[in-house]
Each structure stands twice: as C-alpha cells, then as structure tokens.
Image: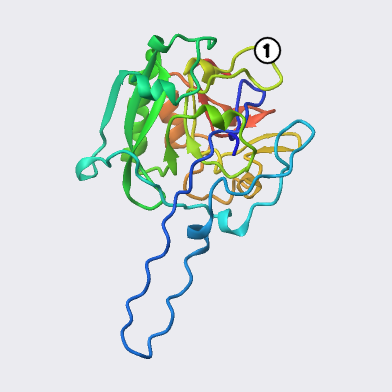
Amino acid sequence: MGLAGCDHQGTEPPQPTPSPLFAPASPATPASPAATEPPPAPEQARWKVGAKPLPRRPDGLGQVLPTPPELANRALPTEDFLPPPAEDRYASTIAAVPADVLKRSTWQPACPVASTALRYLTMSFWGFDGRPHTGEMLVNASAAEGVTKVFGQLFAQRFPLEEMRVTRPDELTAAPTGDGNSTSAFVCRPARGQTNWSAHAYGLAVDINPFCNPYTKGDLVLPELASAYLDRKDVRPGMLLPGDPVVRAFGSIGWSWGGSWTSPKDRMHFSATGN
C-alpha cells in the first residue's frame, strides 16, 4: 500500500495506508410486499483503502492520478481497534512501548533512537463519522507530554482524523496505492533521496490527515491520488490552513509546520526539528 510521504524538506515514503475502514450498508427492513430494494451504499462507504496498487514511476513512487470522485470530499468512517473514550471526553496515556507494539512497529536496532527513548501514546480523536475514537502513536519521550496536549486541543475543537495508528514494517515496502490517510508519528527510515534520517525516525514529527493535506514538490503529489486537495480555497474537514487552531496548537509546543515551506510544501507535517 505504501506510505503517504513527508519529510525533512525532501520526501518521505508515502505514509501508512490503513486497512479497509468501512462497513457494508445495513440492509433495509421490508415494510410491505411492495417494498423496493435498499438504495446503494454511499460511494465513500464502498471505497476500499489500499485495494488498488498504482503503476509506478521511475522513482518507485506511484503515478500521480486524478482523485477518484469518491475521495474528492473524503469522509470515510473509522474502524475502532481500541476502545473509544468514555462519555465523549478526551483521554490520553503515556507509557513505555509495550513489547508487542514495538514488534509491530518499524523500530529496529539500526534506528537512530533507542526503543527506550520512545513512548507509546493513546489519545482520543473525533472521526469524520462524527464519533469519538481512540488512536495510538509512537513519539520521542521528550515530545510525549506536548503531543498529548496538542491532540487534546484537537479533540476539543472536534477536528476530524480518519485514523491514528502505529506504522507497520510491511508498509515501508508495500505497493503504493495513493489513498492513505493515517495520522502517525514514528517511522524508522531515512529521508527520501538522502542519507540522513528523517525527523519521523526520531519520533519528533507528526503527519496529520495526509490525504487531506498532501505533500507537493514539482509534479509530485503524495499521497498520489490526493490532487483534489491541492485547492486550499475549497476548505473541507480535516484540512490544515495557515494560522488555524491546529497549526497554532503545534506552534504552542514549539513545533513548525511544513505547510509554510515553499518547496517542498508538506501540508501534513509538523516537527520539533524544523524539518
């Protein structure tokens, strides 16, 4: 599936692509022998994230293709894999990374940060489905308190996120599908086209709704199907804009926004390092 990318004023491989996030439409209850068939499910509910690999460019990324109509105003529902918060209130936890979580993450001994220097966060967020959910994230221990504070502000603002989970190792080599939209932080790999590690490899960067806030450089758009979101005047839920509450919330903990860069423009990306 590939990762939707951002990085160090270079590109990072496309960010994590989620597993299918939708449920089939509920069948209608017949009211009488004359009842008609239920209407088809909404187009977005039929979109299977990660199901269609893209043709590859010479650089190994997927070809940039027009946004499918189903995703032009993206609002896919969220699948719960952690219990949602009680009473619609924000809740967060900070803990050492559990062994099973570390095993399913991209961390390895060659990474530039020790596993003991990372923290496992759980945080409440609002989905595009209008429901509260609980997500997970790995970040640098030095950033854990600030990140949970920021996401508490996002929750209070009811800013929608589609998914928040730890990136898996297989996603680093999966075929690009260009439709990922997972909010995430730690990913252990170098910046694309460079030998240095990205800020994500230290757990010091967070990407927010990559599909709604794509990375661009020249003719490259990441995720590759997100071109509909290049029109920033067409404001839709989940988008990040200059001076908005999300940008201000990250700024309050000293993190900078890649959406303020000139080239590349990394609209999804916030970091403690400025890159």
Residue 150, how many percent across, how many down? 37, 28
Element under label 1? loop
Q: Is residue 170 above or below residue 20?
A: above
Asked which quadrant contains residue 32, the reply is bottom left
The vertical placement of 251 against 142, above or below, is below
Where is residue 84 drawn, in percent x and y?
28, 42
Q: Position of residue 133 (x, y in %)?
A: 32, 42
Number of marks in picture = 1
Q: Residues within 10 Å of mark 1 (few under 14, many from 20)?
A: few
Q: Residue at x 55, y 41 (%)?
A: 180
In the image: residue 144, left or right of residue 194 = left
Nearer the observer, 72 or 68: 68
Residue in the picture at 63% in, 55% down: 68
Q: Amino acid at mark 1?
A: Thr
- Give the vertical position of 160 relative to 198 (above or below): below
Determine which quarter of the picture holds residue 223.
top right
Label 1 sits on residue: 195
Q: Is residue 228 left or right of residue 25?
A: right
Identity of the residue drawn at 69% across and 16% down: 194
In the image, 220: left or right of 78?
right
Q: Which residue occupies the extreme right position in the image?
A: 58
